[in-house]
Amino acid sequence: MTEKNADTHTDRPVSDETLLKVAKEIVIKFIEVGRLTPATFEQTFDNIYNTIKETVRKG
C-alpha cells in the first residue's frame, strides 16, 4: 500500500446520526453476546454513545 493510500482520514465532521448508528451497532453486539440487559440498557447506551462522541470529536 502506498503512502498516498495509507492516509484516508478526512477532517469532515461526524454527524449525530452517525454517532447514534455506531452506538446502536455496539449495543446490539452487547445484547447478542449477553453483556447487556434491559435493566442496564439506558446507562450502557449513554456510556457508549458519550465515549464514541468524545473520542471522535477530540480532534
Image: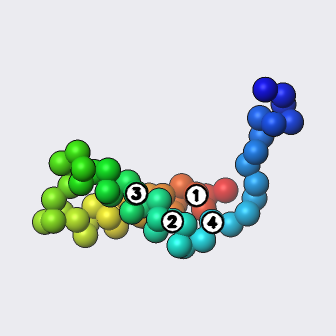
From the viewer's perspective, tell me whether residue 42 is left or right of residue 23.
left
Residue placed under numbered mark 4 in the picture: 14
Give the Cα separation between the discs numbered 1 and 2: 9 Å
Give the Cα separation between the discs numbered 3 and 4: 16 Å
Residue 32 position within the rendered picture, expressed as x and y whole percent measured from the top left? 24, 50
Circles 1, 2 touching at the beta carbon (< 8 Å)? yes
What's under tag 1, amino acid-wise? Val
Which of discs 3 and 4 lies nearer the camera? The answer is 3
Q: Which mark is residue 25?
A: 3
Q: Nearer the viewer, residue 51 or 7?
A: 7
What secondary structure is marked by label 1?
helix
Q: Earlier in the sequence, mark 3 or mark 2?
A: 2
Residue closest to the far top: 1
Residue placed under numbered mark 2 in the picture: 19
Residue closest to the far left: 39
What secondary structure is marked by label 3?
helix
Q: Nearer the viewer, residue 57 or 2?
A: 2
Q: Earlier in the sequence, mark 4 or mark 1?
A: 4
Circles 3, 4 touching at the beta carbon (< 8 Å)? no
Instruction: Give the quadrant of the C terminus.
Output: bottom right
What secondary structure is marked by label 4?
loop
Mark 3 surroundings: few (<14), some (14-19) or many (≥20) residues within 10 A: few
Instruction: Please determine whether, in this image, residue 27 is positioned above or below residue 43.
Output: above
What secondary structure is marked by label 2?
helix
Residue 35 position within the rendered picture, expressed as x and y whole percent measured from the top left? 20, 49
Circles 4, 2 touching at the beta carbon (< 8 Å)? yes
What's under tag 2, amino acid-wise? Leu
Circles 4, 1 touching at the beta carbon (< 8 Å)? yes
Residue placed under numbered mark 1 in the picture: 56
**Residue shown at the point (86%, 36%) measured from the top left:** 4
Residue 2 position within the rendered picture, expressed as x and y whole percent measured from the top left? 84, 28
Q: Earlier in the sequence, mark 1 or mark 3?
A: 3
